[in-house]
Image (cartoon, rainbow, N blue to C red):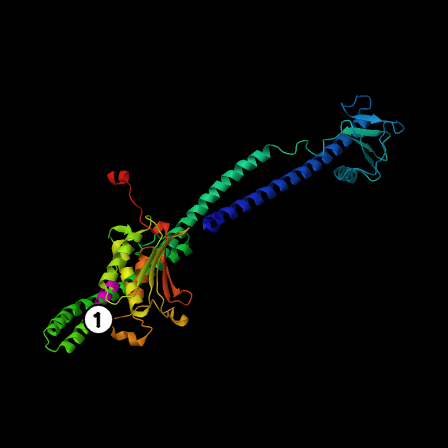
């Protein structure tokens, strides 16, 4: 099951959202802290200014009434609040800040709780307590319109960041798809070079590599196909002359040698063929049954071939590709394996599987890596029986071109098994009647 967090876009999106969320939260907390400190400094400045204004008013205009909420209280009045040692930390810091702004020896007290917030100040030269109003040190609301603005800014920032992450991920996705096609041996069109400089350089290098590999493959295929094609005419003449020989034993030996050489030439041509298979997709189960039935009837001395076909009608592959895969694997099992040979298909959670296994000696573990390499024969004695070491290499190339993966190995010590897996996305879909009309 694919998880969104495994993709580059998912991880970039998660990182971007986490960073934006953390930065907005830190900015909001810092802003509230700074606002509280600014409010406290403003309250201290305001209280100091009011106390100085009251003192000047008493000195210059003692007969004029004081402003509202400002009063003078006799030191012996019971209204004077006692000095409280247990005050909340914000209020205690406020009192200390006001005391620092006043002359030395000034008494500063807070008004009694339950009423409007007031500040009581009496300096060494004051005959009365000066009572002035102060602002509340903390806002009554924990949330305000700033939160709404933060949410809006955060939403727009996330959308812009996700778009930037998507734009950065698209070139990488195209490059990853091209690499996957190149790994399966499929033709790869040039990938557009876009994105950051490093990504453009990477894409440019990949395009150059694909072109060089394609040029090398094409040169090799042309050379191989030319040699194989040129050999067909002399082989045909050799066979014709062999058929005209009088001695039967020598004639049969020459004919067998010519047939072996012809088979090698045909394998060369198949291996050199680099075009896409445009044959009609067929049901794999039904085609496997037909190929096995034909193989039993045609191949003389062939081992017992059994089928275990459970993939269903949804498993379809191009007919020519499937025929070449089965013929090469059955010939390989016939030449080197032991009966019974089993052709099996199955449906899995990820797609379909096709396997061909025998009950021979298998391949040594150290030779499994080289088993599918072109022109590699694990047994030197096999060179004279019409085998060129291309059978498994052809199968691997055909499987990868069809969008599948293959695995070769010994199954339980009972011989060689070639397991081919095809995801649902690589299997041709059956067109419905409505789709064929349109």
Residue segment shown in magenta: 261-271
Quarter of the rendering containing residue 333: bottom left
Q: Is residue 273 visible?
A: no
Query: Is residue 424 part of the magenta span, yes or no?
Result: no
The chief SS type of the magenta part is helix
Q: SS for tag 1?
A: helix
Quarter of the rendering containing residue 26: top right
x and y percentages locating residue 415 in the rendered image: 37, 67
Q: Is residue 119 above or below residue 279?
A: above
x and y percentages locating residue 38 in the rendered image: 67, 38
Front-most of residues 59 and 142: 142
Q: Quadrant of the C terminus?
A: top left
Residue at image point 23% right, 69% down: 264
Quarter of the rendering containing residue 59: top right
x and y percentages locating residue 385 in the rendered image: 25, 73
Residue tagged 1: 260
Q: Is residue 149 above or below residue 218?
A: above
Count of labels shown?
1
Front-most of residues 62 and 68: 68
Q: Is residue 45 visible?
A: yes
Front-most of residues 66 and 187: 187
Asked whether, in this view, residue 15 is left or right of residue 207, the answer is right
Count neighbours of disc 1 (C-alpha within 10 A) and say few if under 14, some if 14 to 19, many if 20 or more: some
Front-most of residues 280 and 208: 280
């Amino acid at each position: 099951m694919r998880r969104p967090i495994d993709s580059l876009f998912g991880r970039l999106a998660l990182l971007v959202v986490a960073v934006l969320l953390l930065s907005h939260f830190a900015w909001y907390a810092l802003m509230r802290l700074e606002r509280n400190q600014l409010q406290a400094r403003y309250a201290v400045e305001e209280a100091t200014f009011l106390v100085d204004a009251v003192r000047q008013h008493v000195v210059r205009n003692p007969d004029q009434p004081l402003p509202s909420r400002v009063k003078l209280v006799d030191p012996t009045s019971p209204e004077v609040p006692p000095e409280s040692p247990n005050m909340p930390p914000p209020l205690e810091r406020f009192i200390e800040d006001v005391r620092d702004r006043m002359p030395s020896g000034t008494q500063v007290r807070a008004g009694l709780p339950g009423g409007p917030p007031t500040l009581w100040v009496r300096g060494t030269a004051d005959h009365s307590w000066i009572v002035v109003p102060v602002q509340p040190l903390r806002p009554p609301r924990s949330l305000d319109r700033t939160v709404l603005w933060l949410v809006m800014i955060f939403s727009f920032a996330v959308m812009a960041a996700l778009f930037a992450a998507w734009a950065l991920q698209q070139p990488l996705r195209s490059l990853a798809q091209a690499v996957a096609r190149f790994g399966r041996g499929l033709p790869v069109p040039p990938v557009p070079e876009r994105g950051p400089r490093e990504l453009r350089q990477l894409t440019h290098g990949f395009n150059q590599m694909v072109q060089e590999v394609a040029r090398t493959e094409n040169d090799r295929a042309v050379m191989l196909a030319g040699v194989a094609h040129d050999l067909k005419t002399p082989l045909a003449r050799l066979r014709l002359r062999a058929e005209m020989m009088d001695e039967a034993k020598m004639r049969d030996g020459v004919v067998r040698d010519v047939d072996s050489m012809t088979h090698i030439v045909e394998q060369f041509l198949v291996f050199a063929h680099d075009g896409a298979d445009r044959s009609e997709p067929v049901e794999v189960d039904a085609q496997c049954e037909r190929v096995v039935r034909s193989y039993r009837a045609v191949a003389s001395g062939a081992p017992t071939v059994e089928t275990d076909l459970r993939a269903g009608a949804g498993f379809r592959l191009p007919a020519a590709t499937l025929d070449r895969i089965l013929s090469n694997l059955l010939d390989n099992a016939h030449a080197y394996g032991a009966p019974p040979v089993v052709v099996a298909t199955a449906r899995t959670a990820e797609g379909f599987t096709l396997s061909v296994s025998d009950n021979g000696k298998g391949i040594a573990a150290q030779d499994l890596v080289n088993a599918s390499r072109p022109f590699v024969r694990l047994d030197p004695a096999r060179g004279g029986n019409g085998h060129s070491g291309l059978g498994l290499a052809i199968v691997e190339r055909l499987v990868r071109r069809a969008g599948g993966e293959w695995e070769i190995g010994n199954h339980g010590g009972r011989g060689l098994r070639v397991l081919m897996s095809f995801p649902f996305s690589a299997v041709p879909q059956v067109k419905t009647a409505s789709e064929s009309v349109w």
